[in-house]
Image (spheres, rainbow, N blue to C red):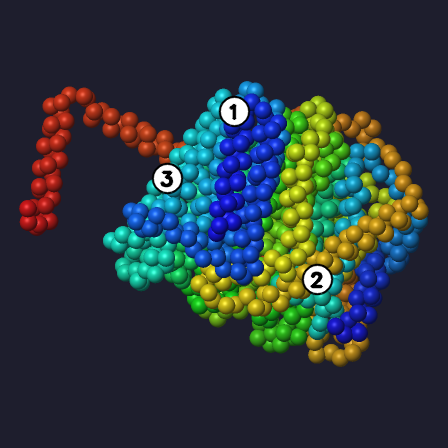
Amino acid sequence: MTLFAVSLLLIVTAGVAAAALGRRPALGEMLFRLLFAVGSVTGAVPALAVLGGATVPDVRLASRAPFGAWAFGLDSLSAVFVLAILIVGAACAFYGVAYLDHERGHRAVGAAHLLLALLVAALALAVTARAAVPFLIAWEMMAVLAYLLVVFEHDRPEVRRAGLIYLVATHVGTLLLFALFAAWAGGGGDFSFAAFAAHPPFSGGRGGMILALALVAFGLKAGVVPLHIWLPEAHAAAPAHVSALMSGVVIKMGIYGLMRALVMFGAPPPWWGWTVLALGACSGVLGVVWALAQHDIKRLLAFHSVENVGIILLGIGAGALGLAYGHPVIAVLGFAGAALHTLNHALFKSLLFLGAGSVIHATGARDIDRLGGLARRMPATAAAFLIGAAAIVGLPPLNGFVSEWVVYQALLGSGSANDAMRRAVLAAVALAFMGALALACFAKVVGVIYLGTPRDTVADAARERPRGMTHPPLGLAIACIVIGLLPIAVVPPALRVGSLVARGLPGGAGSQVASVGATAFTVALAVGLFVAWAVRRAFGRRTGASLAPTWGCGYATATPRMAYTASSFAAPLLGTFRSFAGFQSDRRAYAFTTYAFDPVLDRVFLPAWHAIESAATRLRSAQRGALSLYLVYVGAAVIGVLFYLLLAGRDL
Amino acid sequence: MTREGLVALGILGLAAPALPGIVVKTKSLLTGRRGPPVLQLYYDLWKLLRKGTVYSRTTTWVFRAGPVVVLASLVVAALFLPLDGREAPASFAGDLVAFAGLLALGRFALVLAGLDTGSSFEGMGASREVTIASFAEPTLFLCFIALVLATGDVSLAGMLGTPLAEAWPRAGASLSLVGISLFVLLLAENCRVPVDDPATHLELTMIHEVIVLDHSGPDLALILYGSALKLGLFSVLVVSVFVPRAGLSGPVAPAVLFLGLGVVAVLVGVVESAMARLRLSRVPQLLVGAGALALFGIILQLG
C-alpha cells in the first residue's frame, strides 16, 4: 500500500506541477509527463503483484472518525481496476498534453492537466476504499472532477447542456448510494466494508432492496440501458482524452461497484442474476444498434461503451446466477470474464477515443460522412485505430476476443447445468448478435473515416498528428495485441478475481487448461497471418503489380461524392430494426442522409418530463400567493390527517 | 489427432475448389445445359496465379492484406473441425468462439478491403455483407448452443465428434432441426441462391462478387480459393451433424465425409435451380427463420 500511496502522490504532484508552472509550459508539461509516468509505473507494481497472487494488508486511517475507520485495501478485484485506471490514465495524460497544445493561451490548459491527475487519483482511491465514507468522498470527487473536465470547452452551449445532464445523472446515483449504504448498515454505526460483508442474513425485503439499489445506482454510472442517456452526451462533449478516460475507466466504476457489492453481499437471489443478464443483453444489443445509426464519431463510440457494458453485465449476470444456483465454475468464469473485459474495454475504447480525437484535431470534423481516405494521410493513427476496432469487435488474435471467449465459456457452461440455470445459455446468442453488429459498425467507422477517398476538403488536407498524439494510441494498441496473444498470462489472474467475487469458490481449473489451448491458437493465428503475408509479398514480387484507378464498372467519372457514406452503409441493417434503431432517413433524388436520435431519451424520458411539467403547471393554479389561502390548505391538511388517524383506529 | 484426420484435412484443402464446380454442374444439368467442367475453378486459380496484380491507386495496405487474412483465417478455422469424426487437429474448451471469430476476422478483412477502394459498388457489397452476417452469426450460435446442449461439450471436436453420435438417439429431432438451420446458413454465408446469386451479371444485384471487383491476379485467386474452402467448412458442419462418423473406423470416416460433401454440393445446386434469389430485405427474415428452427431445437432440449 505504501507504493500505491506514493504513486498517487506522484500523480497529484504531476498535476500540480503542470498547473503551477503555467508560465513555463514546456517545463511544466515535461514534469507532468515524467511524474505521471513514474507514478503510474509505481502504482502498477503492487497491482500486478496482487494479480499475480500476492496479498497486501489493509490500511486503517482515522479509526475514530464518525461512521467507522477509513480503511483502504488492494485485493485482486481492486488491482484490475487500478491497472486499468493507471494505464489509461497515463495514456490520456500524455495525449492530453499534445491535444491541448493549441488551446494554450485561451483556455486553462494547466488546470485541465491538474484536474485529470486528480481524477485519476480519485478513481484509484474509489476502487481501494474499504469503507463507505472514503468511498463516497472519492466517488463524489470523481463525479465533480469529471464534470469540470467535460465542460472544458464551456463556451459552447451544447457542452454546458451535456455537463448539466451528466451532473444531474451522477448525483442521482450518489443519492442512491447514500440510500444503499444506509440500508446496508441498518442501525449499526459501522460503515466499513468488512462490517457490510459480515452482515447477518437480511430479513424481509431488505436484501432485495440493497441489491436493487446497487443495481440502479451503479448501473447509472455504468450507463446501462435505459439509464445510459447521459453517457453519449457527456462523452461527446468532453475533450478527446477526457472522453477516453471517461469511457475507458470512469463508467467502469459502476461495474466495480456492482462487483464489490457482490463480494460483500454473497450469493444473490436468482431474480437479481436474471435481471442483470437481461439488462446486459438489452444494453449490448440496443447499444450497438444505436451506435450504428450515429455519424458523430464520438457519440458512436459512446454508444459502443453502452454495448460493452452490456457484455460485462452478461458476465456478471452469469456469475451471479452461478452463485445463486450453486455452480461455482460458472460463477468464477462469469466474474472473471467480466473483470477481463473491463480491462480490455478500458484499453481499446480509450485507444479508439484517442484515435477519434486525432482525427477531429486534424480535420475539425466529427461527422464521419465528411471524412475518408485518412489512412494515407495519418498512417500511424489509422493503424492504431484499426487494431482497436478489431479488438472491440472481438476478433482473434486481439484482447477483445480473449475476454469474450471467457464470457462465452460461462454462458455456454450453463448449458450443462441441470436446473433453471440452463436457460442462461441463450444469452450467448445475444453476445453473438452484439459481435456481428459491432463488426458492421466498425467496418463502417474504419471504412468511412480511414479508407476510400476523402469526401470533403477537410479530410483531404489532414496530416498526421505529432508524436505526442500518435504514441499513446499505439502503446494501447500494443497492449491489446499482447493480451490477445497471451490468454495464458491474463486468464489465470482474471480467474483469481472471479474467485474473489465468488467469495473464494474455486472453479477455474478447467479454464486455465483451456487458456493454454487458446494461447496456442492465438499465437498460431498471428504467426500464420504473418507467414501468409510474407509469402504473398514474396510471390507478388515475382508476378509484379501495377497501379490503376478503382474499377468503376464502366462509369468513367466516379467522384468521391459517389462513394458509400456511413448513412448508406448502415441503412439496410438499421432498416430491419425499424423503430428500435433511433434513426430517421431523408431520401432525395440526389442525396440520402440519416439522422440519429436516442429512442430512450427522446421517446421515453423527455415526454415523461414534459408530462410531469404540464401536470405541475396545472397545479400552479393552486398557488395564488395569498396567505389566507395557504392557511386554509394547512388547516385542511391537519383535519385530513386527523380523520385518517381516526379511521385507521390509532390512538392520538 | 489421427493420421486419417490429417490426411482428410489435406484432401479437404485440395478438393475444396471442386465443390463450387459440382454446384454449377448440377445447376447446369438440371436446367438442360452442359455447363463448365467440374474442375473449372482449378483452371481459373492456375491462370490467376500466373497473372500480375492491379491495385487501385486509392487503396492502402488494408486492401493488400485483405485476401491474405481471409484465407489464413479460414485455414486456421479448418483445424478445429473433427474431419475423422472423432478428433480435430486443434481443440480447446470454447473453441467454437474461435471458429466464429475466425469467420468474422475474414469477413472484416474482406469488407475493409472492399471499402478501401472507395468504389460505391464495393461499399454497397460491403454493406450487404455485414447486414447478412449480422443475422447469420446469431443463427450460427443458436445451432452451436443446440449442439452444446445435446452433447454437453463446448469444443467443436466434441460437439461434432463422439458425443454427438451418442446424442443422436436422445436428441435426434433437435439435431435434425440444427442440421437444416446449418444448411440455410451455408447458403447465406457462402453467397448462394436464395441470398446471393454468384452467376448474376449486374453489379447492383451482387453481394460477394461485388466486394471483390477490384481484386485481381493472385489476390483474386486467394479469395476464390477461400470461398471454396468456406463452402467446404460449412458443408463439413452440415455433414457432421447429419452423419456422425465416430463409429466408423479407419479411412471409412473421411470417405463418408467427402461423399457427404458431394451430396451437399449437389443439394446446393438443386436449391439454386429450384428457386430464385430473395429480395434483399427478405434475407434477414430467412435467417431469422433458420434461427427459429435452431431455437426450436434448443427448446426441445431445455423443456
Please give left or right for residue B269 compared with residue A163 in the image.
right
Cα–Cα span, label 1 and label 2: 50 Å
Residue bearing the label numbered 1: A108
Q: Amino acid at mark 2?
A: Ala
Q: Earlier in the sequence, mark 3 or mark 1?
A: 1
Residue bearing the label numbered 2: A520
Picture disc at residue B106 = none
**Camera-side mark, 1 or 2:** 1
Q: How would you rate the neighbour count of disc 1 (Cα within 10 Å): few for under 14, some for 14-19, many for 20 or more?
A: some
Cα–Cα span, label 3 and label 1: 29 Å
Foreground residue, A208 or A384? A384
**Camera-side mark, 3 or 1:** 1
Identify the residue at image location x=75%, y=38%: B116
Identify the residue at image location x=34%, y=41%: A175
Foreground residue, A244 or A584? A244
Chain letter for mark 2, please: A
x, y percent for residue A115:
49, 33
Q: Earlier in the sequence, mark 3 or mark 2?
A: 3
Chain letter for mark 1, please: A
Q: Are marks 3 and 1 in contact (CB under 8 Å)?
A: no
Chain letter for mark 3, please: A
**Quadrant (top left, top right, bottom left, bottom right) of the N terminus of chain B:** bottom right
Please identify the quarter of the rendering in which residue B173 is found.
Answer: bottom right
x, y percent for residue B14:
85, 62
Foreground residue, B250 or B91? B91
Q: Amino acid at mark 3?
A: Val
Residue bearing the label numbered 3: A172
Q: Earlier in the sequence, mark 1 or mark 2?
A: 1
Q: Amino acid at mark 1?
A: Ala
Identify the residue at image location x=54%, y=53%: A46
Label 3 secondary element: helix
